[in-house]
Amino acid sequence: MTWNTHSVFNQPRPLNNSNLFVSDVPLREALAREGAGWDGDLLASVGQQLGSTESLELGRLANANPPELLRFTPQGERLDDVRFHPAWHLLMQGLCANRLHNLPWHCDAVPGAMVARAARLILHAQVEAGTLCPVTMTFAAIPLLFEHLPSDFSAWREGLLSDRYDPHLLPGDRKSGLLIGMGMTEKQGGTDVLSNSSRAEPLAGRGSGERYLLTGHKWFFSVPQSDAHLVLAQAKGGLSCFFMPRLLPDGSRNALHIERLKEKLGNHSNASSEVEFCNASAWLIGEEGEGVRQILKMAGRTRLDCALSSHGLMRRAFSVALYHAHQRQIMGKNLLDQPLMTQVLSRQALVLEGQTALLLRLARAWENMQDANSALLARLLTPAAKFVICQRGIAFVAESMEVLGGIGYCEDNELPRLYREMPVNSIWEGSGNVMCLDVLRVLKKQHGLDELLAQQLAEVKGVNRHLDRFGRRMLAMTTKADERYARELTRDLLALASGIQVVKDLEPPLADAWCRQHLTARGGEVLPEAVCRRLLSRACGG
């Protein structure tokens, strides 16, 4: 007998073979507006490739098959190597080919390179976010290294600016491409790096570019397979920054022992490790005692990448939910056309509209750091964006899972992986409280911020009454910074900056809807039907 208990119908197809860039109207518009429209054709090609079934499967495979630590050879010799699934290497090839690790640092980089890179990162984050860790650290480290690269490693410049991914274990001057990791935190301190206990003793002379021997440990040593790491250790002159290669110039292994790989909630594709330094060789970057100052040079860039990555994950979760709602039938009509679901998805689209406008404007500010106002905005808004967007993303992805219902909670769907990935950006490179305290420090120490915010508000005065009222209240609060209210102040500052950008850039009905949702006490009032249609159309590429 042939048994047929039921037929399967009303089950939406997964979101495959879509163009991640062409379908994102807010991103396309922001790219052109912020001076990187020249990258549109390449991004359209990258978006098509990344949205393919094959690329999405690579992301799944890289997380289903996490890296493996190989501590010893069969003969018992120290190996301290990490083995990755082939999917990881293929994803890394794409990241390096698209120059996410070095695009703005080329001598022939055109204006808008920082904005173009931000857009490329948003697209790559939608496929697999763990691979962003090595390129983010390399991107942040290159300017510092080009300023202080020890003479023994001068040949590394070419590899750092290459578009090649080279996973081979070779001295840096013999590789076609190089990546840099970081090792800052220790067991007893975490964020408090001044409590680091690792010691550095000079091998011969002291000072910038000199070789030291390091003894100690790192509790989080990111991407241990990198060609070199920037690490912190205590020297005679205080906490200092060192360049620690994986292989020494003569080709021998450095005395850096990987004790274990971390078992993390998410970010499974990426190797995070604990290590010990047993008289490991490292070269001083800058002068002794300048470790914190050197970290701060890199921190802003890595924190911006955290916000960009979280935004990319949010965009992907929303796209999956929206595609599902277009197909799923409930009580005789599409789920998308149910009034309450229309509101939920439209509000998500509105959040992404504001974030896209702000983040690409922030990327342009980072490109123009020689301009005092741009530098002030970058310094103030980067930690604020990291705090707000990275925390917001956790609930945002959960909301997208609810759109799919039970199937969205199952591991054969990509949303659980996105949900597990979200908290890492809120923790790494400084957790929420650290970001908010950083915002307070900027407000207290950087002169001219009040005038700059007032000037930006004056440019849009009278355009939106909600923004005008919110802006007046915020300007009065910035001079009364109190650590107890740092989180509320940071959220409001980012809302103000986003509101200014939204009013400048978005169509008036969308800008007004954004301001009503995010700048008023009422907040969650119903979005007009025409605004919903427009938001959802733009989110699908229309």
Image: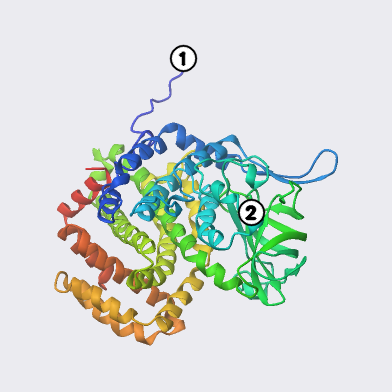
Per the model, the C-alpha gap separating discs 1 and 2 is: 72 Å
Can you see residue 410? Answer: no
Is the C terminus in the top left, top right, bottom left or bottom right quadrant? top left
Q: Tell me the SS state at disc 1.
A: loop
| Quarter occupied by residue 275 | bottom right
The label shown at residue 153 is 2
Give me the residue at 56% from left, 40% from top: 88
Counting residues from the start of the chain, the first of labels 1 and 2 encountered is 1
* Residue at which label 1 appears: 2
Q: Is residue 303 left or right of residue 276?
A: left
Residue 437, image x and y in percent? 48, 77
* Residue 209 x, y percent position in the rendering: 65, 64
Q: Amino acid at mark 1?
A: Thr
Q: Amino acid at mark 2?
A: Phe
Q: Would you call the spot at circle 2 few (<14 residues within 10 Å), some (14-19), or many (20 or more)? A: some
Relative placement, left or right, of 249 versus 447 is right
